Image (cartoon, rainbow, N blue to C red):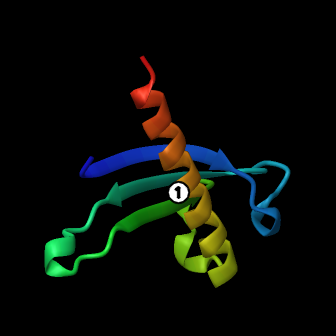
Amino acid sequence: MKNLTSSFIHYLDEWSTETHPDVLVNYEFSKGDKSVGEQDQFEISVIRDKKDIWDLLTPSEQDEIEQYCELDMKRVIEEWNQP
């Protein structure tokens, strides 16, 4: 697997409103070329009310989202590998 693109709905307490209780997380995972020192990386956008709020999140919120992206990626891979 070189790249994986997926999305999921996530609840962020500080960003929850009555009209927008959840955010949409879109991500693309790119596997880095270890032979030249490239790291694996996620390109992430967090959509709330049609706006990307990734840059407005705190570092701990960004870490939380990254962890959920990793979990979602593992889930997607497991689904692909099932017969």
Query: Residue 52 at x, y = what percent?
Result: 52, 64
Q: Which amino acid, mark 1?
A: Glu
Q: Residue at left 39%, top 65%?
A: 43
Q: Residue at left 82%, top 63%?
A: 13
Q: Is residue 11 left or right of residue 3?
A: right
Query: Residue 48 at x, y = what percent?
Result: 62, 57
Rendered image quadrant of residue 51: bottom right
- Please state, as top left, top right, bottom left or bottom right, where the C terminus lies in the image: top left
- Above or below, comparing residue 73 to residue 77 in the picture: below
Q: Residue at left 31%, top 75%?
A: 39
Front residue of this view, candidates 20 and 36: 36
Query: Residue 81 at x, y = what percent?
Result: 41, 29
User: Label 1: how many residues lie within 10 Å, few (<14), some (14-19) or many (20+)?
Assistant: some
- Above or below, comparing residue 35 to residue 71 in the picture: below
> Quick one: which residue is furthest to the left in this view?
36
- Report the label total: 1
> Quick one: which residue is furthest to the top in this view?
83
The residue tagged 1 is 70
Please say whether residue 58 is visible from this viewpoint: no
- Above or below, comparing residue 57 to residue 32 in the picture: below
Please say whether residue 45 is visible from this viewpoint: yes
Q: Secondary structure at mark 1?
A: helix
Front residue of this view, candidates 21 and 65: 65
Front residue of this view, candidates 32 and 43: 32
Q: Is residue 2 left or right of residue 51?
A: left
Q: Is residue 13 left or right of residue 61?
A: right
Q: Is residue 76 left or right of residue 64?
A: left
- Above or below, comparing residue 34 to residue 27 in the picture: below
Rendered image quadrant of residue 27: bottom left
Q: Residue at left 54%, top 56%?
A: 69
Query: Residue 76 at x, y = what percent?
Result: 47, 38
